[in-house]
Amino acid sequence: MTMRALLISFLASLLLVSAGPALSQGSRIKDVASLQAGRDNQLIGYGLVVGLQGTGDSLRSSPFTDQSMRAMLQNLGISTQGGQSSAKNVAAVMVTANLPPFSSPGSRIDATVSSLGDASSLRGGTLVMTSLSGADGQIYAVAQGSVVVSGFTAQGQAASVTEGVTTSGRVPNGAIIERELPSKFKDSVNLVLQLRNPDFSTALGMARRINSYAASTYGAPIAEARDSQEVIVQKPRTADLAQLMADIENLVVETDTPAKVVINERTGTIVIGADVRVSKVAVSYGTLTVQVNETPQVVQPQPFSNGTTAMQPQTDISAQKTGDKVAIVDGPDLRTLVAGLNNIGVKPDGIIAILQGIKSAGALQAELVLQ
């Protein structure tokens, strides 16, 4: 089997996984929605990474690194008066982290470290104690520890090899939470559920499923779909909010999504949803391959002459046209659509061009998403 046939067969196997008529799948509410009060909070801080093997910032090129190092030493009671240091074992970095919801003081989170100056690598460095603040300016965590860098750089006098990013790394469990969020989960008067894929049908179905559960448990409906993304759940007076959320998040609802075709032209990836339909349309796909070969000839002068050796250009041009089939594509369901595209015998990049043309012709009854 040729490489072309293997590519088409592999694409067909991927697309036919979801082939057939659209069937609604039941999913738990915790898998399709998130709690608004349970979101992460972003933290940021400025710090120094020390212990680098000559791969840190050039203090003349990065004056803020020198200022930060002098301020740190002064806070430790060490005098820094004198000339400027030329050491390259220190790098100024930005430290970021995500504060999980309902986190308590004393728990640990990961921190991400990224270089600010002209340091070439953070490998082997140690992050000095750095405070991490939230959007309100309050300090919520303190980070410190060894920096783990996945990339590496090897350099010689005439060549160098670099893999990954060496100016960014992580400090696993390097940040300790020092302050809890001011809002409490049980202080809320209601629950706001946000759909990860906004859809009116799914939101209304979720509200009906929650009200069905509440009618048998509390004797009254408690959920209302505000729009395609949010479902508001009112807390009954006799209910415990944590227990209510635990019961709701395990309810199974029927999800629905609009028909989409997602295309990534860089990788040649095509994802076609099960609800995609194509009206009857004729498709012709052809490619023209032009090959140009330059084979210059060396021309030598006659013996005992005063001529010089010269180069005579010679160009060979060949053109080949393939894929001149015309096919009728009619996709009442996904299986028929994929079979019709594969019958044309084109590569995945050709299928991408065909789908874009079908959409332009108005025959693709779905949203075309280009990445």
Image (spheres, grey):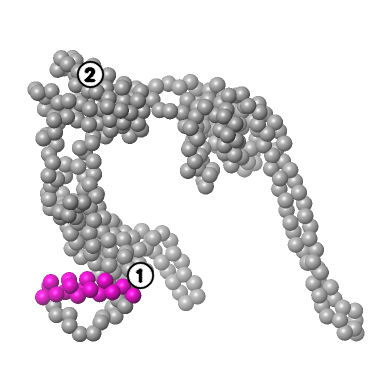
Q: Which amino acid does label 2 sit on?
A: Asn
- Position of residue 290 relative to residue 221, above or below, is below
CA neighbours of label 1 inside 10 A, class few (<14), some (14 to 19), many (20+): some
The part of the chain drawn in magenta is 61-77
Residue 168 locus on image (x, y percent): 33, 60
Left or right of 247 on screen, residue 89: right
Residue 53 locus on image (x, y percent): 31, 73
Q: Is the magenta stretch mostly helix, strand or loop?
A: helix
Label 2 to label 1: alpha-carbon separation: 58 Å
Whether residue 8 can be seen here = no
Left or right of 63 on screen, residue 75: left
- Position of residue 124 relative to residue 5, above or below, is below
Q: Kindly state the secondary structure of the residue where label 1 is placed.
A: loop
Q: Kindly state the secondary structure of the residue where label 2 is placed.
A: helix
CA neighbours of label 2 inside 10 A, class few (<14), some (14 to 19), many (20+): many
Residue at the location (55% across, 21% down)?
A: 332
- Residue 143: quarter of image: bottom left
Residue 38 locus on image (x, y percent): 21, 38
The residue tagged 1 is 118
Q: How many labels does the image show?
A: 2
Residue 104 forms part of the magenta stretch: no
Residue 121 locus on image (x, y percent): 35, 67
Whether residue 198 can be seen here = yes
Depth check: 164 or 368 in front?
368
Residue at the location (70% across, 31% down)?
A: 326
The residue tagged 2 is 211
Residue at the location (71% across, 33% down)?
A: 325
